[in-house]
Amino acid sequence: MKKIKVSKYLAKTIEKLGVTEVFGVPGDYSFKLIEAVESSKTLNWIGSTNELNAGYSADGYARIKGAGVLITTYGVGELSCINSLAGSAAENIPILMLVGMPSTEKILKNEIIHHNLFPPDYCIFTDIFSKITAKAVMLTKSLDINKEIDECIEELKRRKSPVYIAIPQDICDVEIDDNPSDINIFSNEKNLIKAADEIIKALNSSQNPIAITGSRIRSLSAVNKLKSFLAKSSIPFCSFLMGKGIINESSDNYLGTFLGEYVDDKLYKFIKNSDCIISIGTIFSDFNLFGYDLKSDICIYENYSVVKNCSYENISMTELLDTLNKNILEHNKISFKMHKIYPKTESPRDVELTSSYLYARLEEFLESNDILINDVGISMFGIAAMTFPDELRFENQYYWASIGWATPALLGICLADKSRRAILITGEGAHQLTIQELSNIISKNLNPIIIVLNNYGYTIERTLSKDFNAKYNNITSWKYLDIPNIFGDRVFTGKATTEKELDDLLKIVKIEQTERMCYLEIFTSADDIPDFGKYAIKNLKKK
């Protein structure tokens, strides 16, 4: 059989994942891995500004493409992005992480060389990553290397979760069989049939079922099959915040975004009175529930389902929805008028900008087919009350909730899909953590719209703190509009402090974005909080 170097085998494995961009930071132990990527005709190396940003970019990329790849050097490199990989694990984002290690000879001699602990421990980092990945392995000559790599890819695909492979420098040059496996994941047929039967039985015997859609419905095929399921069954459905926009909000049986009892408690009562709640890809977390206690009778996840407390393992969401679509009966349609929270904006005034006007105007600015990205912060509560246009894709990391994720994730998202307009809404505090990745966004000729909400500190932390004015929630003031020009001149910048300035700016941006990146600084006062945010945070603080 034809042979191939391990580094080249890994490059071919990446190609088979459908990935074209690989993120990371070079280091002397990882050169051979990166060189294999650069020698590929289809792979592009994206040199990130630091490893944490590389991990966030790979995460954003994977949300669109279905998988992301990250390469770092041993020790200092890999540990710098452990937070990003943990976030990917928490939110079921498939990331292949490759780490270049010192040579086998140095490992066996336990040599004291750079990037190690003292005394040296060459296995400790693989062990650390084994706690947060679906599979972590360090390749050695004694292992069946083909098998180890293929098993990692199988776990990545089956569990939709990160995997980690550490490769010593000399192992990169070891020759193995050139036969990367075509890894196709199929459901356990017995479990699939049983789960589908039990779900249909529960739904058919229900008088008032309701479905809740969540953020873990990511693959296009799963979204399309879910659309068919909801249309064919006529089951009314709502979304939690993290899953907004997964299914078009104009759908006949859409009840709205769950916002507790804010403004209108009709949806909350509907859910509480349901005799069969089916959740699809939903995370029942505090930022989704806003302090409310809700549970589901049926939970469908990427690779397993739970029906009436009985778990069915190794069944894919896509195949299960496909099976349900063949057998589900139509339910009685209900009349339920969704409450629109933001009114149409009137003629903008020359008055201080507040969140009530800001989010209403941003809602009007959004278009069908946009990708909206939001970092954790006070803006998430303003967005929660929006009504989205059809086919808008909404990406957030509200479960792991690591501020700073969104700016480098924007880079990955834009590289994964250049055909759609991407809009980032981030607070200035989160933005400061990872702002360096603007350099890559500009240098790669990408044209997102970045909206930096400047409210003079960590406003969401202020609201959660005992003392709203505590100094530890202050941040250093930056001249944000000066920063993008450090990295290049393909940037339109602008700021708004009033309703009129915001309205004028968004009209200009709609045109400018077709040619270059648009970078906006939007000011509100430090104590300006979206109305829903006041309500939600009050509920969350009770817990």
Image: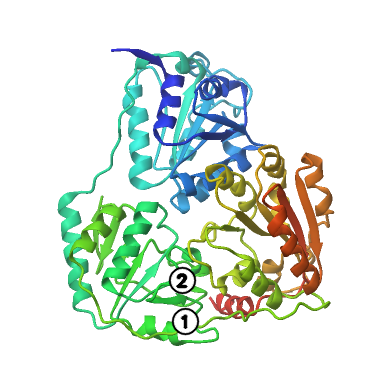
User: Could you tell me if residue 537 is visible in this image?
Assistant: yes
Q: Is residue 520 above or below residue 357?
A: above
Residue 73 lies, in percent from the top left, at 58, 28
The residue that label 2 is drawn on is 249
Q: Is residue 386 left or right of residue 295?
A: right
Q: Amino acid at mark 1?
A: Met
User: Could you tell me if residue 451 is visible in this image?
Assistant: no
Residue 5 lies, in percent from the top left, at 42, 15
Colour pattern: rainbow
- Pick the residue in front: 104 or 52: 52
Among numbered discs 2 and 1, the one appearing first in the sequence: 2
Residue 122 lies, in percent from the top left, at 51, 26
The label on residue 123 is none
Q: Is residue 356 above or below residue 181?
A: below
- Pick the residue in front: 124 or 301: 301
**What is the crowding at mark 2: few (fewer than 14 residues within 10 Å), some, or many (at least 20)?**
many
The residue that label 1 is drawn on is 338
User: Which residue is located at x 76 percent, y 63 percent?
Assistant: 505
If the image is split into quadrants, where does the N terminus sit? top left
Q: Are marks 2 and 1 in contact (CB under 8 Å)?
A: yes
User: Which residue is located at x 41 percent, y 22 percent?
Assistant: 9
- Dividing the picture into quadrants, the one containing residue 267 is bottom left
Q: Amino acid at mark 2?
A: Glu
Q: Secondary structure at mark 2?
A: loop
- Pick the residue in front: 484 or 116: 484
Q: CA distance from mark 2 to mark 1?
A: 9 Å
- Dividing the picture into quadrants, the one containing residue 308 is bottom left
